[in-house]
Amino acid sequence: METATLKLVYTLLCDDVRVEMGNKISLMGIFQNIMVETLPVSLIKFAVVNHWEGNGRHETEVRILSPDRANLVVTSQPTEVELATGGFTDNVSFFVNVVFPDAGTYWVQTVANTKLIDEFPLIVTDQASLNAMQPADEISETIN
């Protein structure tokens, strides 16, 4: 999760981000999956927050890929971050009116200097998909 002079410490998904007094950021509605009544779903607004450490100038972007990784659902504009030696920064990418047409595991990718730095799954599901899953009490357990 790093290049020679840049390290991605963490990535968070949330509904919104505000900059407060003292240049502090407030994150609202942190989430890791999207569960809705019916699909497709259009998210009016959400944000991806990347916390970086390192030094130098770097160009970053965030991409979300379809479950088959064949289609780009959305991508941020490339953003330049500049860090003093030993510095850190938070980069926030806002997305509006993003449509997730189907249930599945989408992929959130963070790119720096045109290299894939990290990716993680974003599970999108609806009530019909949840109902089709096996009830938890019918799943066998393995005891070690």
Image (cartoon, helix red, strand yellow):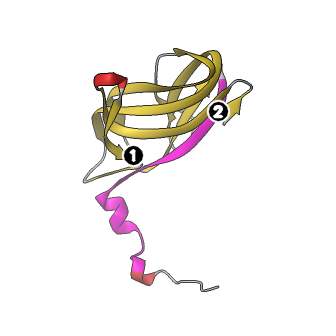
* Magenta region, residue range: 115-136
Q: Residue at x 29, y 36 (%)?
A: 43
Q: Nearer the viewer, residue 107 or 82?
A: 82
Task: Look at 42% across and 74% down and name the residue there.
Answer: 134
Q: Residue at x 38, y 67 (%)?
A: 132
Q: Is residue 41 rendered magenta in the image?
A: no
State which quadrant residue 29 falls in.
top left
Q: Secondary structure at mark 1?
A: loop
* Three-letter code, disc 1: Asp
Quarter of the picture containing the C terminus is bottom right
Q: Is residue 133 visible in this depiction of the protein?
A: yes
Across and down, in percent, residue 100 comes to 37, 39
**Circle 2: residue type:** Ile
Q: Residues within 10 Å of mark 2 (few under 14, many from 20)?
A: some
Picture disc at residue 102: 1
Residue 19 is situated, as x and y percent measured from the top left of the image, at 31, 25
Query: CA gap, disc 1 to disc 2?
Result: 26 Å
Q: Quickly name the residue at label 2.
A: 117
Determine whether 64 is above or below 60 in the image: below
Q: Earlier in the sequence, mark 1 or mark 2?
A: 1
Task: Report whether 7 appears left or right of 61.
Answer: right
116 or 86, which lies in front? Answer: 86
**Crowding near the residue tagged with mark 1, few <14, some 14–19, many ≥20 C-alpha atoms within 10 Å:** some
Residue 64 to residue 121: above or below: above
Tell me: residue 138, above or below residue 32: below
Mark 1 or mark 2, whichever is nearer to me = 2
Question: Extreme right residue here?
Answer: 4
- Along the horizontal axis of the image, is 116 left or right of 81? right
**Residue 46: quadrant of the picture:** top left
The N terminus - image quarter: top right
Q: Residue furthest bottom?
A: 143
